[in-house]
Amino acid sequence: MAVAVTVLASGSRGNCTVVASNGTRILVDAGLSCRETFKRLQAVGEEPRALSGIIISHEHSDHVNGLPGLIKKLNVPVYMTGATRHAWKRSLRDSGVKCEPEKFEEFFSGHSFSIGDVNITPFTVPHDAADPVGFTFRAQGVKIALVTDLGYMPASVRQHIRGCDALILESNHDLEMLRGGPYPWVVKQRVMSRVGHLSNEALAEFFSNDYDGNAAFVVLAHLSEHNNHPEVARAAAEHALAPRRTLLHNRVMLASQATPLDSIRF
């Protein structure tokens, strides 16, 4: 294995992904409990104590719930922006939890940094958090993007994810299912807003109009359990990708809340 990415969980009940190279293991977000994170890491052949670092995209609970437990168990650096750290610490104080990583590293949106032999570029995404970011990862000639929790796909995001070998992108909801679904109207408005979540339709529009067609793998992530269905999301993406499909490119995969996705290896 040279480079691999494995989505351990994706959805409103917890998000967690591993990006690995020959010498580096990075946990992206920590939305599962510590115990469940360890269980899923071991299930995909990863040793939790071999992690090189944990990076956090934003402070919402489905991305940081397991972070206090992981900090207690693992002596690894934790990376997040200063604004995200401030918001996360405030939520910890409000819930009465005491937690402070021994090794904290601050990064800044738009400024690349490295963990081991993996180069990481965080970039701003439109979401209702303190300082939310998506990421691209480069190692050994491979480029991977992980972009969820965004209300729309601005030009800056589209530019960052060009030339990727694997894309992990949000396909959160079907608009009609959301409108007719069980959420209160105020929540529906928030999800559909420009700082909410990306719909199947919005992602399909990106694939049809702005996508460069480069990726060998496209992973649909952060699917709503109430306002989407995996096959509905897959059908929308595959229809939009059809003009660009080849035998080797744009294989569509579905990230799950319940089980890890098969590792994508390069």
Image: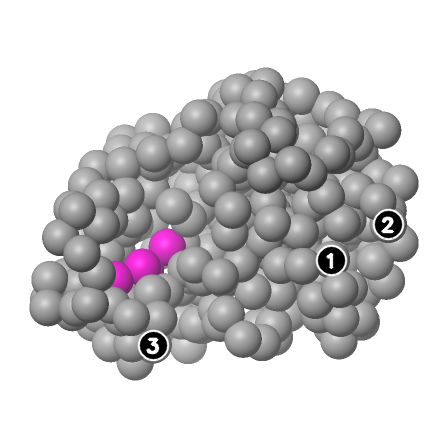
Residue 11: name its quadrant.
Answer: bottom left
User: Spatial distance from mark 3 to mark 1, Cα to Cα?
Assistant: 27 Å
Say whether disc 3 or disc 1 marks the residue closer to the N-terminus: 1
* Depicted 226 relative to depicted 18: above or below: below
In screen coordinates, is 74 left or right of 16? right
Q: Residue 258: tell me if it is visible.
A: yes
Q: Amino acid at mark 2?
A: Lys
Q: Residue at x 59, y 45 (%)?
A: 64
- Circle 3 packing at 10 Å, graded few (<14), some (14-19), many (20+), is some
Where does label 2 land, which residue?
Answer: 73
Q: Nearer the viewer, residue 170 or 2?
A: 170
Q: In the picture shown, does residue 143 fall above or below 171?
A: above
| Amino acid at the residue labelled 3 | Pro
Measured in 3D between alpha carbons, the distance from the residue under mark 2 to the one under mark 1, in whole angstroms, is 8 Å
Residue at position x 51%, y 36% in the image: 58
Task: Where is residue 210? Give x, y as percent.
Answer: 24, 45
| Label number found at residue 230 | 3
Question: Is 46 colored magenta in this rendering?
Answer: no
Q: Describe the element under mark 3 as helix, strand or loop.
A: helix
Whether pointer 2 and pointer 1 mark residues with C-beta atoms closer than 8 Å, the reply is yes
Q: Main secondary structure of the magenta part?
A: loop
Magenta region = 170-174
- Which of the 4 quarters of the picture holds residue 230? bottom left
